Image (spheres, rainbow, N blue to C red):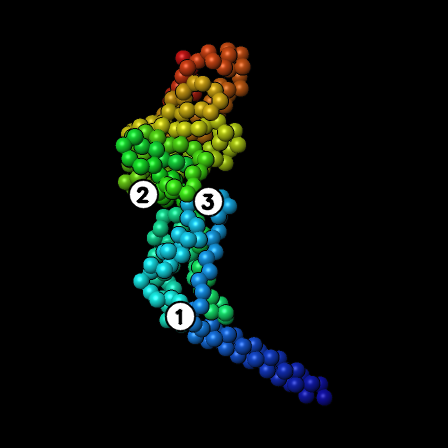
Amino acid sequence: MKLKFSIRKELKVGAALVGLFFLIAFSERKQGGAVCKNIIIEIDNISDNHFLDEKDVMHLVETSGQSIKGTSLSRVNLKAIETKLKYDKHILDAELYGDLKGNLIVNVELRRPIARLVQDDGPDAYLSEEGVIMSVSDKFSSRVMIISGKFVKQLLEKGDLMKFDEGRSLMKMVEFINDHPFWKAQIAQMDVNSHGEITIYPQVTGQLVEFGTTENFEVKLKKLMVFYKEVLPQKGWTKYERVNLKYDGQVIAQ
């Protein structure tokens, strides 16, 4: 009796699994053969980033060179559309899939800007969290740190700061500043010359900070913090016009 009960139980489990697999397969076949009736755009990060909206993404999808609405979803090259969407520098990732109702779901994740790149003889751009440079938009202006100076042209030519040593080093410094509440509020602008030497324009105090390169930037920022906490309260916040942090172990105020 125990043997029969065990066999019956296994048969029931097996039948249930077969039924489940059949439903999954049927659902996939139905989804793949469904005719696209509508395109639904879903955008992540829209609350923080308005560089692209649903209309912009819809335009990219509809100008992909494929007939979508009225076409079986199984015949639409979704990967090709995803590739086109990700070609836009504002888009970090894109995923397309069809549902059982015949909708093509277009899910897009936007890049987040961490700095604005400003040049005197050309258009501005934004630096994203991934180090990728993306164009500005008439729709939205992000309140982020400004990076100016002749070095900006080199950054724009590279297009991705993570592809070269100086870019990666600058990215680390920008990320550190943005993650630190005091420095994020204090450092409004960094001017970087053609040699990669930085001048910091602070938000509150009046002194220009001759920072040097990004080498040992954390040590330099610690020295600057000591200057703010121990020197300025005693000497006066407006006594000095410039602070030099280029030299090891020294803070030169003038």
Q: Which residue is found at the position 41% from the left and 28% from the top?
A: 189
In this view, the mark in front (3 or 1): 1
Name the residue nearer the viewer: 66 or 126: 66
Name the residue nearer the viewer: 210 or 128: 128
Q: Which residue is found at the position 44% from the left and 53% from the top?
A: 54
Q: Identity of the amino acid at label 2?
A: Gly
Compared to 147, does 60 lie above or below? Answer: below
Residue under label 3: 49
Residue under label 1: 70
Residue under label 2: 159
Residue 237: image location, x then y, percent: 50, 15
Label 1, secondary structure: give it. loop
Name the residue nearer the viewer: 66 or 94: 66
Label 3, secondary structure: give it. loop
Task: State left or right for residue 214 relative to residue 31.
Answer: left
Q: Residues within 10 Å of mark 1 (few under 14, many from 20)?
A: few
Query: Is the N terminus in the top left, top right, bottom left or bottom right quadrant?
Result: bottom right
Q: Identity of the amino acid at label 3?
A: Asn
